[in-house]
Image: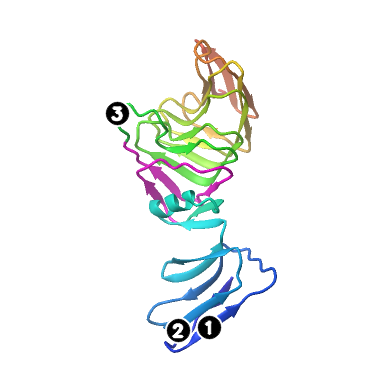
Amino acid sequence: MTKKYHEKADSKVIANFSGNNTFGEDVAVYSEKGTKYAGTYEVKGLENFVQTEIASQDKWIYETKALVSNADELSKALANEKVKTNKLTANITSTTPVAPKVGVTIDGAGKTLAVHTVSPEGNNTADGVFIQEKDVTLINITITGTHDDNLVEIYGDNATLDNVTVTGSKKAGIYVNHNGVGDITVNFKDVHTDANVWAGIGLIAQKEEATIIANFSGENKLDEEVALYTDDKMLYLGDYKVNGLKGYEVKRVGQQYHWKKTK
């Protein structure tokens, strides 16, 4: 990371970049601001970086990455097609659903995303984190919420949840809803679910030609009485493959299959 500061009001730093510049940090360049540092700055030639003000500093970060500290910043970053990684710098509370686009990562950096959506009566869209697109990743994050829906709903193929905690849903913590045909895959690594009313994870493959492939790796801790379930086979005709979920046993319960902790 490069630091630029000038103390006097009549002073200016001009930073000229050329060639291929790479930075391993979230913030590549920053300049000090405020009464102590009254000078001005100009950064030239730093391609693929965007200038933004964070915590009373001007900071240059990769154009494809956004550092977000509140719901408004997260919403704007998710709407920006150039941004592929959204990294939380603080706990965030959103009153609208959070819907990443294709190939987007939300990196919680250990923070919590609380979604408190109030939907109109009869609403049938997702109220929490809504993964409708493919290749979406949630990593290092806790998801909570007070709305009446599942906290995380997944429709898109190749979603990945890595070191994710989902807690306090009035339905399922994580709900995978495959309403098309063919296979979709969801990857779970080091996932923790707790205090979700229906179950930790629910799977529903609606059509006969549909299959949900749920791949588990690492240490997964699903603390509900029903850790994972597949929905009513008489109503939803698809198939399921659950791989790598260690420490849980599956039993048929009516037209569902339930995974519970091995005693």
Quarter in which the N terminus is drawn = bottom right
* Cβ atoms at labels 3 and 1 below 8 Å apart: no
- Mark 2: few/some/many CA within 10 Å (<14, 14-19, 20+): some
The residues bearing labels 3 and 1 have C-alpha atoms spaced at a distance of 57 Å
The residues bearing labels 2 and 3 have C-alpha atoms spaced at a distance of 55 Å
Mark 3 residue type? Glu
The residues bearing labels 2 and 1 have C-alpha atoms spaced at a distance of 8 Å
- Give the image quarter of residue 215: top right
- Mark 1: few/some/many CA within 10 Å (<14, 14-19, 20+): some
Q: Which residue is mark 3?
A: 121
Vertical position of residue 43 compared to residue 142: above or below: below
Q: Residue furthest right?
A: 19
Q: Which residue is mark 2?
A: 39
* Cβ atoms at labels 2 and 1 below 8 Å apart: yes
Q: Number of marks in the image?
A: 3
Mark 1 residue type? Val
Q: Secondary structure at mark 2?
A: loop
Look at the image and say whether residue 107 sits in the magenta stretch.
yes
Q: Position of residue 188 (x, y in %)?
A: 59, 36
Query: Overall secondary structure of the magenta stretch?
Result: loop
What colour scheme governs how the chains and residues are painted in the rendered image of this protein? rainbow
Instruction: Give the mark nearer the N terminus: 3 vs 1.
Output: 1
- In magenta, the rendered stretch is 90-118
Instruction: Give the mark nearer the N terminus: 2 vs 3.
Output: 2
Q: Answer left or right for 21 relative to 252.
A: right
Instruction: Give the mark nearer the N terminus: 2 vs 1.
Output: 1
Q: Position of residue 177 (x, y in %)?
A: 51, 27
Look at the image and say whether residue 27 sits in the magenta stretch.
no
Residue at the spot 45% in from the left edge and 34% down from the top edge: 194
